Image: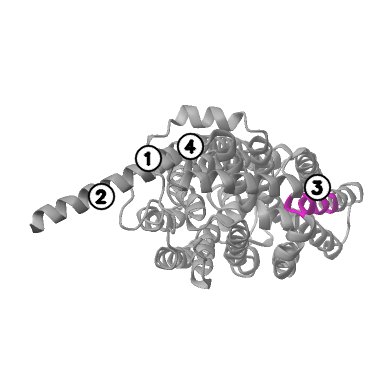
Amino acid sequence: MKKLGLKSYIGYGVADLGNNIAFAAVGSYLTLFYTDVLGAKFDDKTAATWLTAVTVIMIIARVWDAINDPIMGWLAQRAKPTKYGKFRQYFLIGGMPLALSAVLMFAPIPDMSLAECIVFAFFTYIAYGMLYTVVLVPYGSLATVMTRDPNERSRLSIARSIGGGIGGVPAGILFPLIVYSTFINAAGEEDKLLDGNKLVVCMAVIAVIMAASYLIAFFFTKENYDYPPTAQQTSLRKALGSLIKNKPFVIMSLAGMLLIASSMYISAINLYLFNVYYLKEGMMTFVTIATYAPMVAVIPFTELIIKKVGKKEICVYGLIVSVAATLVMTVWRIPDPWIFIAFCFLQGVGVSFFTLEIWALAMDVIDCHELATGRREEAIGYAAFTFMRKIGQAIAAIVPALIGAVGYVAANGYAGQSERTADGIYLLATVVPLVMFALMLVLMLLYPLNKKRDAEMRARLAELRSAAEQPSEEAEEEAEMCAEAAAAGEGAAEE
C-alpha cells in the first residue's frame, strides 16, 4: 500500500483553502451585499420584493446545483483518465473560471433597477455555483484514489478541514474590519454600512489566492490508485438507486446537509444579529475566532481521540454540547455580545469533531456502498453526498426572506431598524440553529457505523479487495501456458 507524504496532505488541504476562501465570503457576505449594496436605495415595498427575489434565486441556484452535482460526478467517473489522472485536471479546468466568477458576483454596479438586480444576481450566482461543482465533485473523489488507508483518509479529511478553516479566515476575521464605511442612512444619521467597493477589491484578492491554491493542489497531489475500467461504464440510475437503499449513506447525507445548512445560516444571520441587535458590526471577527478556535485546538488530538472513541461516538458527544449551548442562547435573551460570543465558542466546541471528520465519514459510507454492491463508485457517491449538501445550502438561503419577514429594510441603516426587527433577528439567530443541531444529533444517534461495525466493515472490505486483486488458479494456469508457448516460440526463432 502506497503511503502519502506531507506534500500530498498539503496539496489536498490547500485545495480546500481555495474552495472555502470564496465559499466563506459568499456564505457570509453575499446576502448582505444583495440587501445592503444592491438594495440600498429600495424603499420598504421594493426592498421586500427584492429580498423575496433573492431568496428565490438562491434556492433555485442551490436546487440546480443539487441536480448538477450527480451529473458532474457521473461525467467525471465516466471520463477516460489522462496523464494527470481522472480528477486532478479539474483544478485547472474549473479553478480559474471559478476564481473569476467569485469576483463578478460582488460587482457593485450602481443605479440598477429591481429587474436588473434580479437578472444580475441570477446569472452570476448560477455561474458561480456551476463552476464550483466542476471543481468540488472531482476534488472530493480525488481522496479515494490517493489512498485506501482509513487513517490516511482521516488525515486527508483533517487536512481538508484545516485548509477550509484557513480559507474562512479572510471573510470571518478580516472582512468585518475592512469592508464597512460610514454612510448617511435614510434618517439622515451617520451609520457604518457595508461598502460594495471595498468588498469587490477584497474578492479580487481572494480570486488570486484561489488561482494559486488550485495550482499548488494540482502539482502537489497524485492519484496513486488506478480507477477500475468498469467504473467508466457505471449506470447513473443504478448507482443512485443503490445509494438510496444504503442506510449509512442516507443518514450521513442528511447529517451533512444539516451541517452545511447550519454553518452557512449561522454565518449569514450572525452578521445581521451583530449589525442590528448588538450594533457591533466589527465584533463578527471575534465570533469567527470563537467558532473556529475549538476546531484548531482539537486538531492535534483528533486522530488519537478517533482511534480511542470512534468517529460516530465523538460526533454524538460533541453535538450534545452544541445543542445544550444553543438551547441556553435561545431561552436566555443574552444582553451582552461578549457572553453571546462565549456561547458561540461552546457551539464550535460541540460541532468541531463533526466538521473535521465529515469528509472521512463520507468516504466511509462510500466504502460501505462498495461492500454492499461490489462496485467502486466514488465520483457518483461523492456527488450524491454533495447533492444533499447543496440542498443544505438551499435551506440556508432562506435568510433574506426571514429577515424581510421581521421587517428589515437596508435603507434604514443598522441603527434605524425597529425593535421588533432586532428582536426577530435574535430569535432567527438562535431558534433555527437549535433545530438544526438537534436534528443532526438524532441522525448521528441513528448512524449505524459505530467504532466496532466500522472496523468489521474495513476487515471485510480488505478481504474482498485482496481476493479481487489475487489472480485465480485458472488465470495462473493460463498465464503459465502462455509463458511456455512464448518460450517455445523464442526457441524456434533462435533455431
Q: Residue 196 or 135: which is nearer the viewer?
A: 135
Can see residue 390? no
Task: Report how far apart the C-alphas of labels 3 and 1 lie in the structure.
Answer: 44 Å
Mark number for residue 430? 3
Three-letter code, disc 2: Glu
Residue 317 within the segment the image draws in magenta: yes
Which type of secondary structure does the marked residue at label 1 adopt?
A: helix
Is most of the magenta stretch helix, strand or loop? helix
| Residue 316 percent coordinates (x, y) | 80, 49
Q: In the figure, residue 234 lies in which quadrant?
A: top left
Q: Do the residues labelled 2 and 4 touch (CB within 8 Å)?
A: no
Q: N-terminal of the two: label 1 or label 4?
A: 4
Nearer the camera: disc 3 or disc 2: 2
Which type of secondary structure does the marked residue at label 4 adopt?
A: helix
Task: Report how far apart the C-alphas of labels 3 and 2 lie in the structure.
Answer: 76 Å
Mark number for residue 484? 2
Circle 2 residues within 10 Å: few <14, some 14–19, many ≥20: few
Residue 332, relative to residue 294: is it above or below? above
458 displayed left or right of 137: right
Three-letter code, disc 3: Thr
Q: N-terminal of the two: label 2 or label 4?
A: 4
Nearer the camera: disc 2 or disc 4: 2
| Residue 254 percent coordinates (x, y) | 67, 38
Q: N-terminal of the two: label 4 or label 3?
A: 4
211 displayed left or right of 402: left
146 displayed left or right of 396: left
In the rendered image, which residue does mark 1 sit on? 78
Which type of secondary structure does the marked residue at label 3 adopt?
A: helix
Q: Do the residues labelled 1 and 2 touch (CB within 8 Å)?
A: no
Circle 4 residues within 10 Å: few <14, some 14–19, many ≥20: many
Quadrant showing the C terminus? bottom left
In the rendered image, which residue does mark 4 sit on? 70
